[in-house]
Amino acid sequence: MKETWNVLYRGSLSSCNYGCPYCPFAKTRNTRAELEKDRAALNSFVDWVEQQAPRSMGILFTPWGEALVRSYYQEAFTRLSWMPHVYRVAAQTNLSFQTEWLSNVCTDTAGLWATYHPGETTQERFLDACEHLTRLHIRFSVGVVGLKEHIPQMEVLRTELPEHIYLWVNAYKRDDAYYAPEDIERIRRVDPYFGFNAVAYPSRDLPCRAGSTSFTVDAQGDVRRCHFIPKVIGNISDPHFASLLRPTLCTNDRCRCHIGYIHRIDPNLYALFSKGILDRIPEDWPNIQPSFSNRAALQETQLLPPTNSRVQESYPAHESPFS
């Protein structure tokens, strides 16, 4: 039996309807010609996915901007959701789009990774969008950027969201002394697995699924092991493309982002998320797995250095300190 592929697609779309000050991306506006080019590339990718049957596949859209406000992304998402060999199609989104089109997707396979951005929308409006998703029986997780000033909003979200909706928090990792112990305790009550995102994992020469059963595809069809390793390993137009995929040790010093470390062999978060690996939903949620929550709590200590020294870490231009 062929192994399942988890594919992260990022086209050339770069525009966003939000202007979050902490986001290093989406500070541009696409022209009509650029959008048409992105649409054509997306349709080619979806055609390629269709041709991979019967191999089981999961697809996650990780756009530079907000994709689901575009009708052609909605159409592609819907089409992918009904492909029998696609076990999950998911997208990172701010939920600013009209939700009616989701009534046409296959709810067995569709999932959303929805981030709430205080300052860009009201909590009431965001929760209303979440309620619409629930009525449509759409799987989704909710996330918040882990700024300390966002902690009160996180706590309200956790209270207002249905218990079965997982609320995750992306840690701020540029400042080693950013969080006080009481901050981490409050965040842990919102997200018991917060600690897994609190770490910049040493990764050089360590095993990962990236490049073998997980990989990224861009608008040209070029394939990379992950979004954080720029080397192209092939192109999906190559009929022998699958033969280029193989287990390879990581070439980066650190792995900081959820869409990167989730595919590492250690800490084996596939066991925690299972088929929720792409829409960021733990398999047994709202049940908490003590073995994982305890390990996450241990990792949170890395956010609490023994001294008051502050170490500023340099991040590559294509990475966010909140991912």
Image (tube, helix red, strand yellow):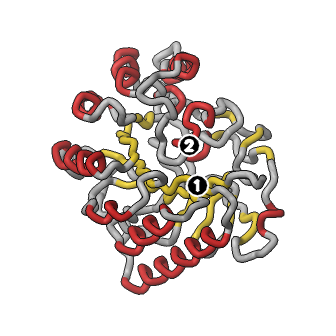
Q: Is residue 193 left or right of residue 6?
A: left
Tag 2: amino acid: Lys
Tag 1: amino acid: Gly
In the image, what residue occupies the spot 36% across and 50% down?
A: 138
Q: Element under label 1?
A: strand
Give the farthest residue toward the bottom.
Answer: 33
Q: Is residue 289 left or right of residue 75?
A: right
Q: Say which of 110 and 186 sits in front.
A: 110
Disc 2 packing (10 Å; few <14; some 14–19; many ≥20): some
- Which residue bears the numbered disc 2? 275
Q: Where is residue 127 in the image (x, y as percent from the top left)?
A: 22, 44
Q: Position of residue 253 (x, y in %)?
A: 70, 41
The quadrant holding residue 143 is top left
For the residues bearing labels 2 and 1, Cβ distance under 8 angstroms: yes
In the image, what residue occupies the spot 67% across and 55% down?
A: 5
Q: In this view, does 161 lie to the left or right of 285?
A: left
Q: Where is residue 135 in the image (x, y as percent from the top left)?
A: 26, 48
Q: Say which of 103 and 16 sits in front.
A: 103
Q: In this view, does 42 lie above or below 306?
A: below
Measure how far apart labels 2 and 1 are at the Cα level.
9 Å
Q: Can residue 24 be seen in this view?
A: no
The quadrant holding residue 105 is bottom left
Q: In this view, does 47 lie above or below 308?
A: below
Q: Say which of 280 and 187 sits in front.
A: 280
Q: Find residue 316 and name its label.
A: none
Disc 1 packing (10 Å; few <14; some 14–19; many ≥20): many
- Which residue bears the numbered disc 1? 58
Q: Can residue 284 be seen in this view?
A: yes
Q: Where is residue 217 in the image (x, y as percent from the top left)?
A: 62, 65
In the image, what residue occupies the spot 25% across and 44% down?
A: 118
